[in-house]
Image (cartoon, grey):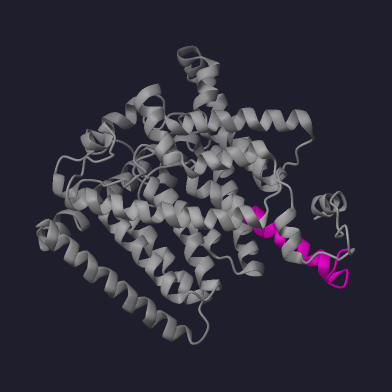
Amino acid sequence: MKNITKELNNLSVRNANYGDKLSLNMWLNILPMNPLVKVYYGLLFVSPLVAFFIQKYLVLLPYYLLGTVAVILAIFLAIQKSLRIPKYIYPLILFFIYSSAWDFFNGRYEQFGIIKLIFKNYSLHTIAILLIIENENINYKFIKGSIKIFKIIAIISFIVIIYQFLFNSYFFTPIESNLLSVDIDYFRNTSIWGWLSPWGVGLSLLPIMAIIINHDLLEKNLIQSFLWLGVSGIVAFLTNTRWIMINFLLLLFLPIVLMHGSKIKNIIFGIVSSAIVLLILYELFSLSGMNIEKYYNDRIMDKTADTRVLAFKLFSESFPQNPFLGTGVRVDEELKMALAKRSSQIHVGYLSCLYEYGIIGSLFLFTFWALVARKFYRIAKVSKQYGIFIGFLCLIFANLTFVTYSVFEVGIIFLFIFARFYNIEYSLNKIYSSNNHLIS
């Protein structure tokens, strides 16, 4: 809060003609934002489109390039001023050091070179973007504009995935995604997010939708809120990806928590809304000519669930060999032989991390996730912005059924940006409260 107070003292607080004191909303609007940071945030808004050109013409993975730009920007800001490091980031810094040490001992620096490894290190990218977010102001004008852009992104995502599902699954889809889907009926549709990452809908769009739904619920736009909830559900199910469908269910908690009145009534309302979404999905499946019973048996209840059982079995056999330090690689030769082509890896994120980095390395990463979840929950309690907390739970729950350690996803980055603004808003409220609600 000291940083906010200092910033306010540097601003002009009186109207030039009348000496009027500014309202809280006016303060939130005039907080200055670094123009370079605004440009970078703007790049994140259009990242699904930018990712297409990066992969198509530069032959680079988009997140590596976006992450490297974040590192360069953080260094530039650090040269200009001293950057504050929030306590919750320290475990991630320790994880970055630990994983980098494993890269050194495994000979990856000799194989790829230090520059290339830095370019590809998602932990370093995450540290950089968090330092940028936590040391720069965010004003209400930017937040308001972001909500509008998010809604446009949601509509485009909805239209594109409907087109992919009904007409052409290969539309705006990377070749890698095509290779992953043998049966066209169960194609992993990625909407506009496929060029950015294969799990963009689950870890970028759904967290963004959580922010939108929370915003409209607080604005008492109930019809819009449930329309966005319906859009989220349809997009999630049309991805044909189970963990994304499960992540959507997390969003159903938002109306239960935020709507006024009886919780039982809210739950019934949520069930009815879900039923409507299922009816729409039924019609979409019928239009596509897909056999719904076959889809349920072959996709929702298929035998790929066995890979999770296999994950626990292999973990229990292999983990005791290197419990504290891990192996330093996700799949070593011994695990590869044990998998015997039944799966590509240990398909549970938490178990895979323990196998790769051991108890010590995993403790650093899991502590970081826990501290972020606690931070978002605390902000949500005082601001009623539970969307940031639910959005982050998408990552936590995703790792129950697949593997990703990275927080450097566009949707999750925006959770941190919005959390920063809500923190600023809360700090300003406290300052106003201690000064008769006005800053003179």
Residue drawn at point x = 49 percent, y = 27 percent: 120
- Whether residue 397 is visible here, answered yes or no, is no
Nearer to me, 174 or 297: 174
Locate the C terminus by quadrant. bottom right
Camera-side residue of 287 and 108: 287
Where the N terminus falls, by quadrant?
A: bottom right
Q: Which residue is drawn at 59% across and 42% down?
A: 364
Q: Name the one closer to the observer, 109 or 13.
A: 13
Tally of numbered tags: 0
Q: In this view, does 337 lie to the left or right of 226?
A: left
Residue 117 in picture, x, y percent from top left: 51, 22
Residue 166, image x and y in percent?
18, 53
Q: Work out whether residue 166 can be spotted.
A: yes
Residue pictured at 43% horizontal, 29% vertical: 329
Which residue occupies the extreme front position in the image? Answer: 17
Q: Is residue 82 above or below residue 226?
A: above
SS assignment for the magenta stretch, majority: helix
- Determine whether 76 is above or below 236 in the image: above
- Numbered range of the magenta stretch: 419-440
Residue 377 rendering spot, x and y as whole percentages: 60, 62
As for residue 85 lying within the magenta part, the answer is no
Whether residue 34 sits left or right of residue 47 in the image: it is right
Q: Locate residue 59 relative to residue 165 in the image: left or right.
A: right
Q: Nearer the viewer, residue 304 or 321?
A: 304
